Amino acid sequence: MYYNANTIIYHNGQFVKAADATIDLYSQSMHYGLSVFEGIRSYASKQGKTKIFKAKEHYLRLQASALALNMPFTWDIEALETATYQVLEQNQLQNAYIRPMVYAPANMSFSKNSQSYIVIQAWQMAPFLGNQLLNVVTSSFQRPNPKAFHIQAKAGGHYVNSILASQEAKAKGFDEAILTDIHGYIAEASSANIFFEQNDILYTPQLGNILPGITRATVLQLCQQLNIQVVEGNFTPEQMQAADGAFLCGTAAEIVGMASFNTIPFKKPFPDTLGSIIQTQYANLVTND
Ligand code: PMP
């Protein structure tokens, strides 16, 4: 599904076959979740070129995540962007999901490493998730305490929380989980940020307890251009349950509308919401040349 016998990845400065690449089973990342990664997306542009959306922003976040976890990050951002385009070209990919990961060498202790390793993988991904509206539910799992983790870092270990929340929501028959923060305010979904709409204003959880999404930042920019008012703050699940509409946003999810929250349908049909306008604008933006 992710690779075949011919797939090429970038691994520590070399382009190698995915099937031949190995990692050390004594890696600190394997044992303790100390790794950082990105989820990036490339698109076939309107003129048919391969365009990576916000590559620089993603690699800068990868760097910031690594440094937050005391992992050495010695790579040049532009060189990583170039390597990523090469991975796409060598695998003849255009509409792809790109997964760079920085991981640690063999180390069974908790000590800082003098070196990190990097891998860039990519696989085919359809350009859109479709317009399937999501039925979401408040998770019994909260986002990690920001005093326990560098919550703004995209770290491997944090995703145990996402996996628990996502699997719980699906086991209950929902499409996705809405996690609250340690104070009970809505925070984010398992791998996407949240916006909801009330009386033509958008509301989104403030930074501090969430991953600062690159798509979230893009939505904020689009709202500014479109003169849509956005309020960033602390909002309860009850406030979101009473909303006119809502959507999730993330690199992989793109902009996806929600049908209901905690079984309560949103008041407006999604096509009549600001989320629908943002969805169209976002789809246009990512395929710009
Ligand atoms: N929150 C979490 C927990 C995520 O994993 C993601 C996906 N990276 C997002 C939000 C959305 O971030 P982005 O828009 O940068 O993909």
Image: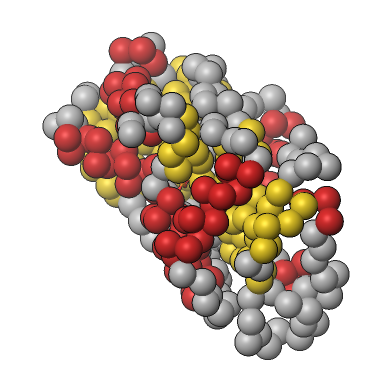
Using the rendered image of the protein, determine whether residue 288 is visible from the camera's viewpoint.
yes
Quarter that holds the C terminus = top left
Q: Residue at x 62, y 36 (%)?
A: 92
Q: Is residue 6 above or below residue 121?
A: above
* Residue 266 on image: x %, y %: 41, 19
The quadrant holding residue 177 is top right
Compared across the picture, whether 15 is left or right of 235 comes to right
Task: Report if residue 137 is visible in the image.
Answer: no
Taking 15 as reference, is 223 left or right?
left
Q: Is 82 drawn above or below residue 218 in the view shown?
A: below
Q: Nearer the viewer, residue 75 or 205?
A: 75
Residue 89 point in image, percent of width and height: 58, 42
The structure residue drawn at horizontal position 74% and vertical position 40%, both measured from the top left corner, is: 2
Placement of 18 over or under 246, stated as above or below: below
Question: Is residue 7 or residue 66 the one in the foreground?
Answer: 7
According to the image, what is the colour scheme of the structure?
A: secondary structure
Rendered image quadrant of residue 138: top right
Quadrant (top left, top right, bottom left, bottom right) of the N terminus: top right
- The picture places residue 136, in percent across and down from the top left corner, at 55, 29
Total number of numbered discs in the rendering: 0
The structure residue drawn at horizontal position 31% and vertical position 13%, both measured from the top left corner, is 272
Residue 7: x, y in percent?
Answer: 74, 44
Establish if 176 lies above or below 211: above
